[in-house]
Amino acid sequence: MTDRISSARTRKGIAVAFLVAAVWGAAAALWTPRGPSTTVQALGSIAISVAVGFGAGRAARTRWVIIGAPLAYAVVLELARMSATGPSVDAPHPSVLGLLMLISGRGVHGLLSLFPMTVGAAWGCGVRRRIPLGLVTAVLALVTVVAAVPARTPAIPGGVAELARAGDLRVMIRGRDAAAPVLLFVPGPPGGSAVGTMRLRLPALEDRFVVATLDRRGGGDPRGLDSEVADVLAVTDLLRQRFGRDRIVLAGHSGGSIPAVVAAHRHPERYSAYLGTGQAVNLRAGDRILYDDMLAWARAGGRDDVAGRLVRQGPPPWRDAYDYEPFHLHAAEVYAIAGPPFDLGVAEYTPLAKAHVMTTMLDAWDALYPNLQDVDLLRDVPELAIPAYFVQGGREMRSLAVPFAAWHAALRSPDKRLVVFGSSGHHPMSEEPDRFAETVTSLLSGQG
């Protein structure tokens, strides 16, 4: 009789343990469907997971809960977030980018939830002698400390240096004189950030301007050009109010130059000038050029794997973000230019933000890029009512240079100027930063 009672209690304890873990999995799917992405979410996930694991261990009193509770959490989490889409939550993809997404998506999520739950379960069920609990506890403490490291930007004596927010959009604002002209910079890729590049390579701009660097919206929520323009306008209004300006300077690079120039076209009353670099014009036309150039490059260089994949997919546009993997991996090689700078070694990025760089960009790419295929600045932005300045690389990718040349020739503006850096490719601001800062200062002199 005693054995039957004990067995019944054990089964009940195990059921309770798995139920608690499953409930936390469902709650986590609602709270952080793509995994913890902020310091608060990361620390909250660690704390709750430890508590759930400990409670599960106390209820079950068996070492099997060390595996079972995290497994129950993971299964329910995956089922509950099935409505979420994007490379970080979709089925793992057998490719280079797929592996990176698996590590920075589910891998980081597991480190902040499954691992703490495992440690908590080990504490709760009292199997300290069976595993090196002291070691894993020390590792968990280290993970917690790293997750708690906040983002910060070094102070500028007598100036302005802050990490601000416009709603859920993050903006780094830096300048030696708060009365200087305000320049808002919109970075290139969907979900992308140029905070590190602006801090490490272009501090000279802070001597002449209050430089605001926008982090573009990440995540996988479907959106299009209008929502991206709305983000630019929201940050614009934040800066106008914060610094008491009627107008500011708006700058954009690559993919970020499309919503930036459209914002300037629709609302010229908010801007004193527009500055484009690595200017994008027509993504569909540019991608077709890149497809042809990459296919020719792959065939000439014996890259049968790349050529075969491009032939199987056919010309863009494509719906699947992974179909663009050859472009991400080989575009710089095709045109023999420098690849994108990541410049992650600055305090403005938390360790968690650094770990999520790929998931943020590729999820945003998946959600946004297909919805920008109909944009054509020749049609959509035939003129700007404000000065339009461009700093382009002389070795820019043909896929961007050809559409830009046609649009720039037709663009009407009260003051249109083009400066070409002969030895730069797609990133003049990071390839020749000193010259870029001097050129921008010269072009924008007199613009408030």
Image (spheres, grey):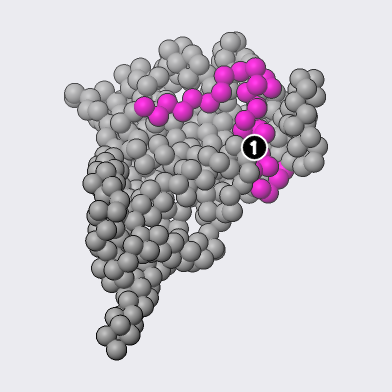
From this view, report whether residue 273 is shown above or below residue 229: above
Residue range of the region highlighted in magenta in the rendering: 317-345
Q: Is residue 138 left or right of residue 319?
A: left
Give the quadrant of the C terminus.
top left
Q: Is residue 338 left or right of residue 238?
A: right
Q: Is residue 216 visible?
A: no
Is 18 within the magenta? Answer: no
Front residue of 339 and 389 = 339
Which of the 4 image quadrants contains residue 403? top right
Front residue of 400 and 158 = 400
Task: Find residue 419 and report its horizontal and vertical position in percent.
Answer: 56, 15
Is 323 within the magenta? Answer: yes
Q: Residues within 10 Å of mark 1 (few under 14, many from 20)?
A: some
Query: Which residue of the protein is positioned furthest toward the left in this rendering?
Result: 158
Front residue of 4 and 443 = 4
Task: Find residue 391 and report its horizontal and vertical position in percent.
Answer: 54, 20
Q: Residue at x 45, y 18 (%)?
A: 440
Name which residue type carries label 1: Glu
Give the quadrant of the N terminus.
bottom left
Q: Residue at x 38, y 55 (%)?
A: 114
Front residue of 138 and 45 = 138
Which of the 4 image quadrants contains residue 300? top right
Q: Residue at x 40, y 69 (%)?
A: 22
Q: Is residue 68 left or right of residue 292?
A: left
Task: Find residue 65 and report its horizontal and vertical position in percent.
Answer: 36, 64
Secondary structure type for disc 1: helix
From this view, report whether residue 273 is shown above or below residue 136: above
Q: Which residue is mark 1?
A: 325
Q: Is residue 415 left or right of residue 40?
A: right
